Amino acid sequence: METLDARARAHSIDERPSGLKQDDAGDRQPIRPRLMRISEINRNCGTMSPLKTVCNWINEFLASPHPQSGRLGSVCPFVPIALRLDTIWMAEVAETDPSYERISTIITDYRNVFLNTEPKSGPDAINKVFVVVFPSLGGSGCDGAAIIDKVQASLKRYFVEIGLMLGEFHAQNESPGLRNPEFRPLRSPIPMLAIRQMVESDLPFLIRDKYPPQERSSFLRSYLFRLGGTLSEVKFNEAVAGLIAAELAMC
């Protein structure tokens, strides 16, 4: 039932550029907070604000080298470019106790907004990111982190199928780094979910054994369909091999 609910939310999104929805009485109600570029946050938000805290973390951690990352360069190689292009958008959900259903609605709504926000195509599109921050969940410890993980797990498929990735960040995140299993690159000072374009290097996040074979198959079919013509031979062959293994495991 939970998967069906997630599918319904993910596939029932319509165009709402104003950030409003219509309830049964015909009133227009806000369904998501306003997105701001990092440049606007740096100009207008106080140093103690949640958005400013996340901005500092992006600059000081994601956009910087780290001795445990296992490679040269910044923790996320796309972030320095995105900062330079000012294509990182952020929004703060200030509600004190957002539910799983409420967060799922907000994130699925942002999916359409992301697709309709420039740059929509071309090489700069891979540097566009939406970061949705949930400060109140930080005070809930593991419970708040669990909600973020639950939303990401239930909605990921409906992002991947249209060529997007949905990432979960919080202080308890145990996802290992790609080159150093002891590194924890997805730990953030405030719980948040991030939306971005799928890229070739995302294959390890789609092929992991923790996903059931049917889900892996869906991920890899979308990956090959969306990126197949641009993939290196190594990644293409790895994705095809993973797809075949997933399909055989379903038999």
Image: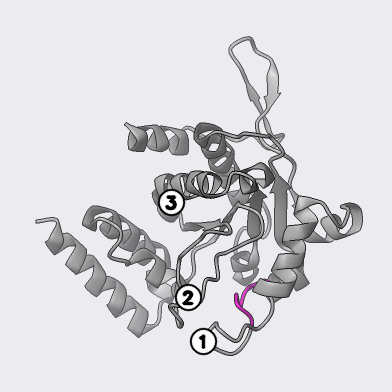
Q: Residues within 10 Å of mark 2 (few under 14, many from 20)?
A: some
Q: Earlier in the sequence, mark 1 or mark 3?
A: 1
Q: Earlier in the sequence, mark 3 or mark 2?
A: 3
Question: Which of the labelled discs sits on residue 70, or is there none?
Answer: 1
Q: CA distance from mark 3 to mark 2?
A: 19 Å
Position of 239 relative to 11 (above/below): below
The amino acid pointed to by label 2 is Gly
- SS of the residue under disc 3: helix
Question: Which of the labelled discs sits on residue 156, or is there none?
Answer: 3
Q: Residues within 10 Å of mark 3 (few under 14, many from 20)?
A: some
Q: CA distance from mark 1 to mark 3?
A: 27 Å
- Does residue 204 appear anywhere in the picture? yes
Pick the residue in front: 3 or 235.
3
Q: CA distance from mark 2 to mark 1?
A: 8 Å
Dominant secondary structure of the residues highlighted in magenta in the image: loop
The amino acid pointed to by label 3 is Lys
Q: Residues within 10 Å of mark 1 (few under 14, many from 20)?
A: some
